[in-house]
Amino acid sequence: MRADKISLVAKKDPLICAFASRYLKIHRENHFILVASRKMRELARLLLEIKKIKPTIKGLFETLKPDNYDILVSATKAASRFDKDSKTYQAPTFALNMGTTLKQCCDIALVYSFKKSDYLASTYSATQEADLKTLIQLINGNWKFDVSNQASSDLNINKWNKVTLVPLATDLKLLKDYLIKQADDALYKLQENSSDEKSYTTLIETIYCRIILLNRRRPGELQRLLVNTYKSIIHHENDELLMSSFKRIVIRGKREMGVPILISKDVQEHLNIVLRCRSKILKMSNIYLFANPKSSKPIVGYKALRKHASPCGAKNPDALTCTRLRKHLATLTQLFNMSENDMEQLASFMGHTLGIHRQSYRLPDDIYQTSRISKLLILMENGEAGHFKGKSLDEIEINLEENLMDMSDKPKSKENEHGNENWEATEKQNDETHLDTSNAQDLLENSEKSKLDSDSIQKPKIRKLVPWTTEQKNLVMNFF
């Protein structure tokens, strides 16, 4: 931890240190050290707020009593910057997590109390045990009313109007072309000088970014790939067809899940060059494939992607992040007619459950509401919902760019009869031009056309909306 007052409090408190030690017994990979450090700082910030309210308290262990429940609530609100006027949390996630963290601290304190007690439990130890169990019951029963409910509400409200960014296809193409060019330049320099550390780092970063673009993996999962894991992959004859183009490696994902990555032939060739130059540039203690030449740790994946996303010429480089690339994959695949089994396979490939896939990675609600539900609202507002009885939302075709509030164009007088004929001819020409630009004339030859009543020109012109058939839709989708 960085040296400040918070880290000093965290390191001095035995219970906070015991909490981190217990956490690291469950999460044994090295990168979880940073998570444990963050959780220690959260508890230290809470303890500092507690001391402001009750200066006689010296450590977190003393605070874990039923009498101090209100102090814990007040300190949590202060640490998460609760505004009493607006009744909102500026850091709602801190408030949500603290209830669970405090219960875990009570469990650790119970174990500590048991170990320190004599063979025949003393009165003091029994009192400690009773206080800790009572505090756990208080947190289970009341924390959601005092803290969690409002914090959860604030967290959800903050997400409602959050703009959802997904990468553009043109930006992805620009990024890939840029990465290939940077890799070629780095390879040329490494051929001249195999000890060029800067070119080696550039080549490693471009390889990493290209694998991320193809597989849409979480940055930490890929950056911690070991050299031995990559070298030890031996494919069977059954995989010969697939592996003629790709190399498949299963790495560790969330919740101990194995997630696959595919490495293309050209990227494999670049990796072979990296492995040949590795001994001249890296420390022997570095066990990672995407190793940082200046330390024994891997490169920081998300920083490498951000580094190359800005100069590639993308219109929206902020959307080129690992999380948004994963969301981009899930959003596009939602447009296809995928079965339940296909969705499960996709969720498994991405390394999460089907429920998480639908809640966090599906097509954003703002796009869904605008594109589908708006059809229903417009039809109801214009009193035309009955015309589409028995139709699904996909079968209803509405041009949202037109002025749907006024479906009719009424001529003002008979003197405008000639103008109306010109207007009709113009509309027909526009319709034909629209079909030409869509390359779909042959799909609509059998569609019904709305005609203007020749006997009563002054009647409003009503455009009859005829939904496309499933066959027509499939033809258009296949064409584009």
Image (tube, rainbow, N blue to C red):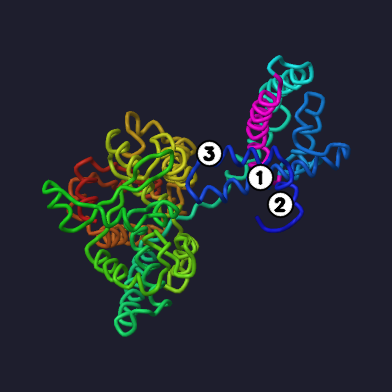
Main SS, magenta region, reads helix
In magenta, the rendered stretch is 90-118
**Residue 40 - label:** 1
Q: Quadrant of the C terminus?
A: bottom left
Residue linked to disc 2: 7
**Element carrying mark 3:** helix
Farthest bottom residue? 192
Asked if the residue at tag 3 contacts the one at tag 1, i.e. Cβ–Cβ closer than 8 Å, the answer is no
Residue 247 appears in which quarter of the rendering?
Answer: bottom left
**Element carrying mark 1:** helix
**Residue 354 - label:** none
Q: CA distance from mark 3 to mark 2?
A: 21 Å
- In this rendering, the answer to whether 62 lies above or below 336 is above
Q: Nearer the viewer, residue 52 or 469?
A: 52
| Disc nearer the start of the sequence (1/3) | 3
- In this rendering, the answer to whether 170 lies above or below 72 is below
Q: Is 423 left, or right, of 477 in this rendering?
A: right
Q: Is 74 left, or right, of 343 in this rendering?
A: right
Q: Is residue 356 magenta?
A: no
Residue 79: give x, y in percent of width and height: 75, 44
Q: Residue at x 75, y 33 (%)?
A: 61
Q: Is residue 105 magenta?
A: yes
| Disc nearer the start of the sequence (2/1) | 2
Residue linked to disc 3: 25
Residue 84: give x, y in percent of width and height: 81, 40
**Element carrying mark 2:** helix
Q: CA distance from mark 2 to mark 1?
A: 8 Å
